[in-house]
């Protein structure tokens, strides 16, 4: 780790998350209709998402958010910027 990089979490897009990983939503990108559709699914800033399954060909992803399970297309997941959450939290 370089100087000044302490406690900096790595941000990436939800479509890159792995099975059994917990992530926190940092930002939702895209134009207004895409953002609205994603937020209507319950995915909002600071929300914790658990990656439950990923289809064999990588699309869709099955996630758990706000206590319910949801399938999301990889193309939509690419608009959701996330960061890893420590499992100790």
Image (cartoon, helix red, strand yellow):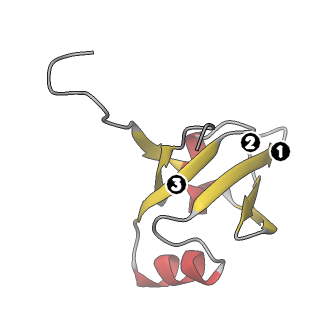
Quarter of the image where one finds residue 41: bottom right
User: Can you tell which mark lies on residue 58?
Assistant: 2
Comparing 87 with 70, the one in front is 87
Q: In which quarter of the image is the N terminus?
A: top left
Image point (41%, 83%), residue name: 32
Farthest-out residue, front: 89
Q: Where is residue 81 shown, x and y percent of the image?
A: 44, 54
Q: Distance between the residues labelled 1 and 3?
A: 21 Å
Q: Quadrant of residue 70?
A: bottom right
Question: Where is 85 relative to 29, above or below?
Answer: above
Q: Position of residue 37 (x, y in %)?
A: 58, 81
User: Mark 2 packing: few (<14 Cα in 10 Å), some, or many (20+)?
Assistant: few
The reply to whether callout 2 and callout 1 are in contact (CB within 8 Å) is: yes
Q: How many labels does the image show?
A: 3
Residue placed under numbered mark 3 in the picture: 24
Q: How far apart are marks 3 and 2 (CA)?
A: 20 Å
Q: Which of 35 and 22 is in front in this view?
A: 22
* Mark 2: secondary structure: loop
| Residue at image location 47% in from the left, 51% down from the top | 82
For disc 1, the marked residue is 55
* C-alpha gap between disc 2 and disc 1: 5 Å
Residue drawn at (83%, 45%), measured in percent from left and top?
55
Give coordinates of residue 11: x percent, y percent: 40, 43
> Between residues 17 and 31, which one lies in front from this camera angle?
17
Q: Which element carries disc 3, helix, strand or loop? A: strand
Question: Of marks 3 and 2, which one's residue comes earlier in the chain?
Answer: 3
Circle 1 Cα neighbour tier, 10 Å, few/some/many (<14 / 14–19 / ≥20): few
At horizontal 39% and vertical 36% (from top left) the residue drawn is 10
């Amino acid at each position: 780790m370089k100087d000044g990089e302490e406690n900096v979490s790595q941000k990436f897009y939800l479509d890159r998350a792995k099975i059994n990983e917990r992530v926190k939503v940092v930002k939702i990108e895209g134009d207004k209709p895409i953002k609205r559709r994603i937020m209507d699914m319950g995915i909002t800033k600071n929300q914790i998402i658990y990656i439950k399954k990923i289809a064999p060909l990588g699309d869709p992803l099955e996630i758990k958010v706000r206590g319910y399970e949801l399938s999301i297309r990889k193309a939509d997941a690419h608009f959701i910027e996330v960061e890893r959450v420590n499992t100790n939290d």
